[in-house]
Amino acid sequence: MATNRTFTMLKPDAVQNGHIGAILEKINAAGFRIVAMKMTQLSKVDAEAFYAIHSERPFFGELVEYMTSGPIVSAILEKDNAVDDFRTLIGATNPAEAAEGTIRKMYAESIAANAVHGSDSDENAAIESAFHFSGRENF
Ligand code: UDP
Ligand code: MG
């Protein structure tokens, strides 16, 4: 059954480039409610665990290095059809292929430094939210 929550991170390039406010504005304007939010910096162990599904991919080392390179903002978002609607809002993984008006088209630097994460399923949204937030932070 589809749930109404997804998980996101504003990645190090988005934070470094001063895009936190603009991206949160777009998220709110698209009808998502922010359920939980914080700024952290991932350790190598954290990033390797979060992206474990990609551990055999050629870009894994670069991805972990990038995701640990600076602070991120992680958040749990709520909206009907949250997972799919948020993937539409952020656009394709490669910003060069992302649709006009999507967050990645507007703010991403490259396929690696692509501004935002969005969960790809309800199951992963729950797993990723639990990875970043405790029950006390997750309202
Ligand atoms: N990534 C990369 N090179 C690639 C594909 C992906 O650096 O060729 C990075 C990128 O930051 C991406 C993340 O790995 O967001 C996870 O990849 P995935 O295929 O899950 O893309 P997403 O679900 O984030 O669109
Ligand atoms: Mg993914």
Image: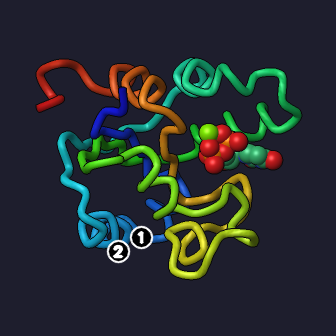
> In the image as oriented, which residue stretches furthest toward the bottom?
100
**Residue 66 in sight:** no
Residue bearing mark 1 = 19
Along the horizontal axis of the image, is 61 left or right of 7?
Answer: right
Residue bearing mark 2 = 22
The amino acid pointed to by label 1 is His
Dot 2: what SS? helix
Give the spatial CA distance, label 2 vs label 1.
Answer: 5 Å
Along the horizontal axis of the image, is 117 left or right of 135?
Answer: right
Which quadrant is home to the N terminus?
top left
Image marks 2 and 1: residues in contact by CB distance under 8 Å: yes
- In x, y percent, where is residue 64? 67, 34
Residue sitting at x 74%, y 69%:
97
Residue sitting at x 51%, y 47%:
117
Ligand 1 has an atom within 8 Å of the beta carbon of the residue at disc 1: no
Along the horizontal axis of the image, is 105 left or right of 9?
Answer: right
Which quadrant is home to the C terminus?
top left
Q: Give the crowd class for mark 2: few <14, some 14-19, many >=20 residues within 10 Å.
A: few
- In x, y percent, where is residue 46? 52, 22
- In x, y percent, where is residue 85? 42, 55
Residue 76, placed above or below residue 133: below
Mark linked to residue 85: none
The amino acid pointed to by label 2 is Ala
Along the horizontal axis of the image, is 101 left or right of 77?
Answer: right
Ligand 1: give its quadrant: top right
